[in-house]
Image (cartoon, grey):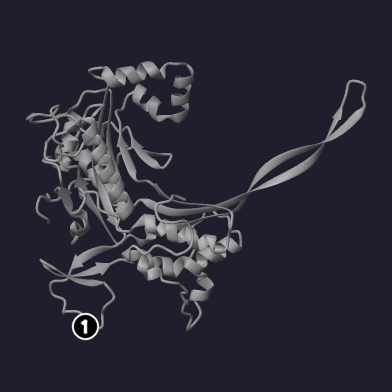
């Protein structure tokens, strides 16, 4: 167990909590989870065992200008015709690739550092430490929990953006020069990295002790390890090599948030999208929002912890023999704690395996909600079949390679 972690809870009879899927997220109004911190803690651990779904979604469309003849009758029954011009958006391809299948490690249960702005039981972001605070007279020498100032919230948002783009784990607080060396070796599976001075169980207890009527505890699953910015550019460039119209490449994650909410009629009504929409139409929701924001027993948010799942990560191999000199594939490195081996497929290797399949899907105008397969299952069953990968420098993606075709780095797709 890594330093700062905690031992798993003792075994006892499992409790099956009530929950449902709303959109792409899990929601529970179970009364016991709102009263017993141990039950809430175990529920989060059990839900974290299910990995989130992570898909790459590629779409392409073009606009066609068309003309149609419109017939119209006047009051005397005479028919007249005229040409009407209109435009129509035509979808050429729309398919998904399953990135979540590449997860090789996790969950690692993490919590937000005390100095990171986060929702800690109120409707505003707060901090429990001044360690990451900028020099600001508003802060002074204040200790304990306090409301985060705008500059802290902005800095935290920038750190999260860097983590998302470069595939850093959520417990890293990247700085201008230090973040490149911040991910040496990830903790072992099922480990818990506690950036907060409170354990996950203590946060669960604090939530259960609150008497607020519209409180909410959120556990967030995060996927890390790949530079998704470079990968998105590479996929879009591969598509544009065979397609010249509008291209959109996105990463979509689902089943990644677990929301615990109170078991009362108002809280359940707000979890129902149709009832929530009706409350807006009837102009009732603004008054509920004011009560939730300012009422003593109104709302409170806890967004302080989650689980992390790695697409690739370094693993210590203390008993392993040193790699041969010819093994210069970048999968071994020496760390202060001993030799480490990279587990999981690198984004460049994944792209090399999928590049031809992506182009074929575009050429054949595939539209499917079911994620594509890299090769046909019928072909895999053939004796002696071995897929041949064609690529023009795909392995460099892992080192930040920018393709020579497509949009320049920095532009979104």
- Above or below, comparing residue 42 to residue 387 in the picture: above
Q: Identify the residue at horizontal 26%, vertical 17% (top origin).
A: 295
- Residue 374 appears anywhere in the view: no
Decide which of 30, 52 is in the foreground and name it: 52
Find residue 139 and report its horizontal and vertical position in percent: 13, 29
- Above or below, comparing residue 207 to residue 325 in the picture: above
- Above or below, comparing residue 310 to residue 128 in the picture: below
Q: What residue is pinned by disc 1?
A: 324
Find residue 10 and report its horizontal and vertical position in percent: 14, 48
Mark 1 element type: loop
Left or right of residue 362: residue 149: left
Q: Give the position of the N terminus as an image quadrant.
A: bottom left
Q: Identify the residue at horizontal 49%, vertical 59% (top origin).
A: 406
Decide which of 111, 138 is in the foreground and name it: 138
Q: Identify the residue at horizontal 17%, vertical 28% (top origin).
A: 209
Decide which of 170, 1 is in the foreground and name it: 170
Find residue 178 and report its horizontal and vertical position in percent: 18, 54
Residue density around tag 1, few if under 14, some if 14–19, many if 20 or more, within 10 Å: few
Find residue 91 and report its horizontal and vertical position in percent: 61, 50
- Above or below, comparing residue 345 to residue 214 in the picture: below
Quarter assignment of residue 213: top left
């Amino acid at each position: 167990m890594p330093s700062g972690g905690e031992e798993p809870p003792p075994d006892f009879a499992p409790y099956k909590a009530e929950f449902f899927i709303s959109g792409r997220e899990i929601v529970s109004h179970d009364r016991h989870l709102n009263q017993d911190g141990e039950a809430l803690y175990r529920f989060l651990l059990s839900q974290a065992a299910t990995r989130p779904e992570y898909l790459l979604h590629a779409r392409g469309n073009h606009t066609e200008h068309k003309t149609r003849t419109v017939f119209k009758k006047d009051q005397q029954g005479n028919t007249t015709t005229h040409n009407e011009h209109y435009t129509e958006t035509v979808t050429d391809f729309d398919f998904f690739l399953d990135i979540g299948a590449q997860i090789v490690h996790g969950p690692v249960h993490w919590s937000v550092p005390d100095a990171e702005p986060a929702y800690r039981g109120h409707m505003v972001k707060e901090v429990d430490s001044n360690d990451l605070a900028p020099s600001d007279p508003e802060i002074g020498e204040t200790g304990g929990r306090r409301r985060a100032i705008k500059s802290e919230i902005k800095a935290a948002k920038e750190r999260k953006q860097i983590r998302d783009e470069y595939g850093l784990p959520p417990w890293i607080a990247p700085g201008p020069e230090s973040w490149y060396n911040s991910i040496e070796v990830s903790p072992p599976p099922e480990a818990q990295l506690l950036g907060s001075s409170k354990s996950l169980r203590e946060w669960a207890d604090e939530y259960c002790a609150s008497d607020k009527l519209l409180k909410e505890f959120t556990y967030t699953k995060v996927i890390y390890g790949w530079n998704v910015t470079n990968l998105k550019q590479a996929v879009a460039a591969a598509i544009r090599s065979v397609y010249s119209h509008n291209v959109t490449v996105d990463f979509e994650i689902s089943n990644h948030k677990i929301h615990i909410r109170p078991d009362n009629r108002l809280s359940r009504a707000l979890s129902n999208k149709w009832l929530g929409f009706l409350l807006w139409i009837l102009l009732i929701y603004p008054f509920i929002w004011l009560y939730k924001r300012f009422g003593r027993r109104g709302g409170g948010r806890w967004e302080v912890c989650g689980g992390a799942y790695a697409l690739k990560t370094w693993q210590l191999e203390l008993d392993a023999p040193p790699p041969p000199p010819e093994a210069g594939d970048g999968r071994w490195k020496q760390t202060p704690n001993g030799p480490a081996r990279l587990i999981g497929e690198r984004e460049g290797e994944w792209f090399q395996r999928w590049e031809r399949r992506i182009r074929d899907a575009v050429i054949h105008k595939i539209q499917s909600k079911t994620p594509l397969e890299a090769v046909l299952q019928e072909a895999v069953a053939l004796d002696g079949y071995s897929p041949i990968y064609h690529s023009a420098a795909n392995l460099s993606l892992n080192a930040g390679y920018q393709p020579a075709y497509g949009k320049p780095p920095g532009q979104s797709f």
